[in-house]
Image (tube, rainbow, N blue to C red):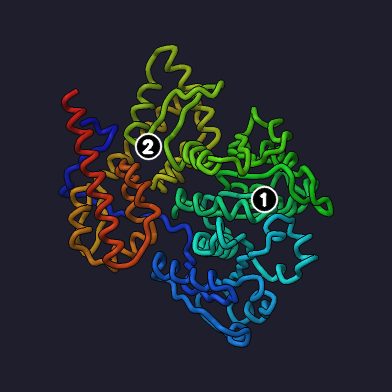
Amino acid sequence: MSKKDHPKTDSPKQEEISFKPRIINPLKISNVVIFSADELVRKAARVVREKRPWIQVQTLADPGSLSEYKSGQSSVFIMDDTAMTLAEAEKIRENNKEAVLILLSFNDFIHRSPPSVVCQKYPFTSKADLIFAVDKDEYLPEKIILSALRCGEDLLNIHKYSKERRFIFLIVDDEPRWFSQFLPVLYNIVGQRGDVMVTRTYEESMDFLFGVKKESQIDEERYFFQGHGDDVVCIITDIFFPRGKDLQSDAGRDLFRLINQYYPRIPVIIASKAKEAFDFQDKAFILPKGDPGSVQTLKDYIHDYTGLGDFLIQDKQGEELYRVKNIYQMKDLLIEAQKESPKAQRLRKLLEIYADKDAFSTWLYMHGFRELGDKLRPRHFRGEGLIVDLKEHIEQEISRIEKTPLILDGKKVFDLHDLVDLLRSGDSQKIQKLAHNDWFSTFLDCKSYSELAEEIRPIHGKGEKLRKALLRKVEKWRKVYQQRAEKSQRD
């Protein structure tokens, strides 16, 4: 079997390096308080207990107990419209220093309206840090609650650990109904590899990206350090959203222009059905928001263009030339680029463009090679020097990862055979902790089992049930990889 597909490494006898994944959210939500008059919101607590068993969930019955509630832990407070009107938000925040207040709203006007209009008609919405759309049909609370909790956790970490190196997906849309539909899909793709930030106005978006409210305030020398733009790996934005008092402004045009001017490496997805969106089709991906299949289309694009999936090489006309699935195939691509042929020369020119956009470092970072991503990010060689530098570092990383086991209770995992043994006999509580932080999926990405990593990344749960679910997936894919290896040997 070719190593460029799925390598089978023998356990090295020496020079082992213990595997340590990157933790993007040092601050974890450990406490959820639900205060709601609606039974569907209260019932959603079951989903949290089942899928996030490390989180303590409490359901409160009266406003007094909510106002007096105190916790030294990071907490999310979930409320429906009625409950939010009764909540003493300032007191809750005073009693809980690391708290996020989330409104799960059943109100269709809130679902479809800009925040300033909503606050004017329903002042209680201003108490919430985040607002999501729920209903009794398509947007059931049990479907959105886990994404709402994670979005709250991301919000806390981005603000509290603002200097941490992280990757952020920025969603710009003033209507909660759309991002409420898409967030569960996005988090299943991202896992623990990146955070999500939601902004709903031009000013919020400018402040997040550049640290200012107006374009005239952007500091040409310091913008890189003032906002979070350098951490953003993808922007999903509408064309029309509020700017100042103009509630239907085409602020997306200016936002797109500024992104291209200051952060041209960031892929932009314009999620809009407006005809104006197609003015940008040469430089952005246009997604007709709400069309059948649009969420799947968005999922596929994010997978291919933000470093989360394959490393996709296209020519200037957008034709796919190469698709790199793992670090071994990345090495093969660089070997191809070193050849003395017109095709190799064209490839080197394309790879320069990708390097200028930090595509290599981002892809490596997203696939578990954190240290290598950090090394390559500030390096901008050209021509053959770029290829030599990349190839040298990739070869060193391959050598390192082959000596890097995942260790649990003294048991070392180098390959799928070892992982099956661990999942069969390992402590279910310790397995649960590793799964929660994406240790298994990140390890599998590093070992070039990217398809398996994709399948187990969204799997969370409790104890034996989780252990068995992970074991079934790994056993399934071990057979698939073995069949591919046998076919490769026959061919």
Q: Position of residue 457 (x, y in %)?
A: 38, 52
- The residue where tag 2 is placed is 393
Point out the image quarter for the C terminus.
Answer: top left
Classed neighbour count for the residue bearing mark 1: other residues with Cα under 10 Å, few (<14), some (14–19), many (≥20): many
Tell me if residue 24 comes above or below residue 218 in the rendering: below
Tell me if residue 207 comes above or below residue 479 in the rendering: below
- Under mark 2, the amino acid is His
Disc 2 to disc 1, how far (Cα)?
Answer: 40 Å
Q: Residue furthest front?
A: 137
Q: Position of residue 24 (x, y in %)?
A: 47, 57
- Under mark 1, the amino acid is Asp
Q: Does the rendering let one see residue 59?
A: yes
- Residue 105, quarter of picture: bottom right
Secondary element at tag 2: helix
Point out the image quarter for the N terminus.
Answer: top left
Q: Residue at x 64, y 56 (%)?
A: 176
Q: Residue at x 72, y 71 (%)?
A: 124
- The residue where tag 1 is placed is 173
Give 383 or 174, whichever is nearer the viewer. Answer: 174
Give 329 or 91, whichever is nearer the viewer. Answer: 91
**Which of disc 1 and disc 2 is earlier in sequence?**
1
Q: Position of residue 209 (x, y in %)?
A: 66, 50
Classed neighbour count for the residue bearing mark 2: other residues with Cα under 10 Å, few (<14), some (14–19), many (≥20): some
> Is residue 127 found left or right of 243 in the rendered image?
left
Task: Please tell me whether mark 2 or mark 1 is closer to you in this view.
Answer: 1
Q: Residue at x 52, y 22 (%)?
A: 315
Q: Does the rendering let one see residue 161?
A: no
Give 32 or 348, whichever is nearer the viewer. Answer: 32
